[in-house]
Amino acid sequence: MRKRLAANPAVWLMAAMMCFAAPRVFAQDQNGQSAPTKTPYTLAEYNAYQAAASQTNPQAKIQALDDFVNKFPKSVLMPLVDQLYYATYVQLKDYPDVIKYADKYLAFSDADILKIPGTSKDKLTGDRLQALYFRAVAFNQTFKPTDPNANDELTKARQAALEGLQLLNQIPKPANMTDEQFAQQKKPAAILFNYTAGNAAFQLKDYKDAIASFQADIAANGNAATPDVAAIYFRIGVAYLDMAAQQPAAQTPANPPNGAATTPPNGTPPANPAMGTQPATGTNPTSNPTTDMYMNGFWALARSIALKGPGEAQMRSYLRAQMFNYEQPACGSLLDQQMNELIQLAGTQADRPTSYSIPSAADLAKVLQGSNLLTIISNLQAGGDQAKMTWLAVCGQEIPDVYGKIIDIVPGTDLIDFKVFTAATGQEIAAGTTANLDVPVYTAAPPAGTNTTGTANAAGSATGATGQAAASTNPPPVQPEVARMQKGTAIKFTGTLVSYDTQPFMLHFANVKVDPSVIPPAPKGPARRPRRPRR
């Protein structure tokens, strides 16, 4: 933005609107009079001022202005002198002195300036607006957060920018200009003042006011899809997320969703079909101010990325990290899907739909606590928001003591893939004929670099598989003895949920360990006949 302010010709439009010609003053006659009234300054002051104003060389003009101040420090013409000062420092790109003398000019009261003949109320408004405009340009060019008086500089810059916006609304429209032409002429000033006010508030960590000013800046830009607007959306996103992080922490369940639950979903069928409590449904948690801050922050960051803002790769990494901290899903691919969908959606509209939301870590923990294997299967088969919420909560979780019946066995080089059916009761399991669980078990250590999620479908396949959990960095259990297991027999295992298919439904496990109690013992060899002793 700083480079744009320096390079964009539109920034200097105000100079054309209110050019830096020397303000008009009247000379006195030999009797100390001027037509039509007596001037409040002497002929010597007039001559010294005109000598400075007529200089075309900026350095010579500064010297002439210094001479005037040394000779007439109390002159009524000092407001005009300060105007010439900051105008000349604009030419020299000496931004600290632009701010210094713009502030000196703005410090004069209206009454002091209106004493000068030729100054009207409308002209005074325009002159003040001009000073505030170039002060904002200079601030954006020169400010450094490491300045010892940074907070004071930021506070003054924001106040000056807000004053500039007020004066901008007071400028009367010229008679020969249409409303549209007048609005376009004021547009660069509105953009600059809003950006400056927002930037100053942002660095003061006054995020609420920063967001308001940045949003006004975007509106002044006409919601244009430009890199500058994208950069402002990024600031808005950071502001929302920082505000949300400052809110009191919500009460979180005792069992977090990221693989640390002390009561994970259980795979043991109970004696009756009623499988425990039902998990929470829906993907939109109850709206509250803190949740809205997070969602608005994610949306603004995503819109910045969609508009191809500068540093897109870094912005993507930042958005993903922020979404992960909020949601903490065990399956990273699900988070990537959410982020990509969000970026695509944010590219189509500026404002977040009130219905858009993603669950928090606490929301997922509640779902996890109320889930077991059969409610997981039921919710995933139901589809819609219920399936999404459930899978976000359970993907990557280890499920202990899963009971089922082996429907089919698919041998492989290093593993055996058991197709298993599970249900609520032993009777239902015994009657089952179609597998709903995919249970790969390694019979030999896989080669280094092997994807140990077994035969689970890849994310987003044509069969409707969801995102997979990342492969574990630990080697999977190796059980060559499972080769003795047969179709139609019972199986009990512990494994990690990694993905599922919708049509036909299949829930995929990885890092499976079969309970040794269900593995048939190794067959014994033929009995050896006892040796008869020699006679």
Image (cartoon, rainbow, N blue to C red):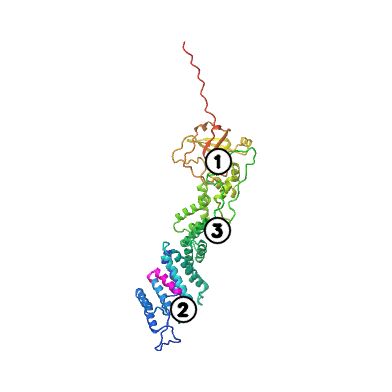
Q: Amino acid at mark 3?
A: Arg
Does residue 6 lie above or below 393 as drawn?
Answer: below
Q: Which residue is mark 1?
A: 399
Question: Is any atom of residue 56 visible in this view?
Answer: no
Does the magenta segment cover residue 92? yes
List x then y, in percent, for residue 12: 43, 70
Q: Which mark is residue 112?
A: 2
> Residue at 49% across / 78% down in the picture?
121
Does residue 195 lie above or below 111 as drawn?
Answer: above
> Residue at 55% across / 41% down in the picture?
399
Q: Amino acid at mark 2?
A: Asp
Q: CA distance from mark 1 to mark 3?
A: 37 Å
> Which mark is first along the chain, 3 or 1?
3
Which one is nearer the viewer's eye here, 81 or 88?
81
SS majority, magenta: helix
Magenta stretch bounds: 90-108
Element class at badge 2: helix
Q: Which mark is residue 352?
A: 3
Of circles 3 and 2, the one toward us is 2
> Which quarter shows the N terminus?
bottom left
Question: Is any atom of residue 42 visible in this view?
Answer: yes
Dot 3 and dot 2 residues touching (CB under 8 Å): no
Q: In the image, is 260 to the left or to the right of 427?
A: left
Does the magenta segment cover residue 497? no
